[in-house]
Amino acid sequence: MTRPGPSLEKIEEMARAAIESLPEGFQPAAKEVALRVVDWPERWMLDDLGMTDPLELTGLYDGIPMTEKSVIHQPLSPDSVWLFREPILAEWHDRGDVEIEDLVAHVTIHEFAHHFGWSDDDIASIDRWWE
């Protein structure tokens, strides 16, 4: 039997709490990013990443990292952090050893780290989540 999962709204509340927990120095930049919580990633997102299984994508940063921005960048839309409810719930069910709030916080902080200019390798060097 699987545990019932929280709603999109509840996932967003958890993500916003994680954003609020960022150190003060990161808050102004984090507030410039749109948080989008939806059930599934769009096909273009998976295609851009060379992925076929939507369950593999729990979150996505869509934008130009702060370390790469300059005054010549004229974005058409705000940088966004996407959280995908169904893949997050699938991971939560599969793992069975983590609280949903912790998983949502992990995915949220991971995606915001990309906004701050960190690569996946940088993030993995300090966040050994998979262990």
Image (spheres, rainbow, N blue to C red):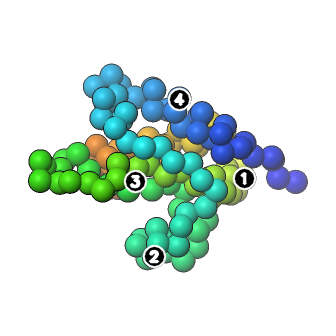
How packed mark 3 is, by other alpha carbons closer than 10 Å (few <14, some 14-19, many 20 or more), is many
Which residue type does callout 2 highlight?
Asp
Assign a secondary structure to mark 3.
strand
Please provide percent x and percent y for residue 104. Answer: 57, 42
> Of marks 1 and 3, which one's residue comes earlier in the chain?
3
Q: Residue at x 58, y 68 (%)?
A: 54
Please provide percent x and percent y for residue 72. Answer: 11, 53
Left or right: where 117 falls relative to 61: left
Q: Pick the residue in front: 88 or 80.
A: 80
Which residue type does callout 3 highlight?
Tyr
Q: CA distance from mark 4 to mark 3?
A: 18 Å
Assign a secondary structure to mark 4.
helix
Q: CA distance from mark 2 to mark 1?
A: 26 Å
Can the viewer see residue 129? no
Please provide percent x and percent y for residue 115. Answer: 32, 47
Q: Residue at x 65, y 39 (%)?
A: 9
> Of marks 2 and 3, which one's residue comes earlier in the chain?
2
Please provide percent x and percent y for residue 79. Answer: 35, 49
Give the labeled residue for mark 1. Answer: 93
Assign a secondary structure to mark 2.
helix
> Of marks 2 and 4, which one's residue comes earlier in the chain?
4
Q: Residue at x 63, y 52 (%)?
A: 85
Give the labeled residue for mark 4. Answer: 17
Give the labeled residue for mark 3. Answer: 61
Callout in the foreground (2, 1): 2
Give the labeled residue for mark 2. Answer: 47
Q: CA distance from mark 2 to mark 3?
A: 15 Å
Q: Residue at x 47, y 72 (%)?
A: 44
Callout in the foreground (1, 4): 4
> Of marks 2 and 1, which one's residue comes earlier in the chain?
2
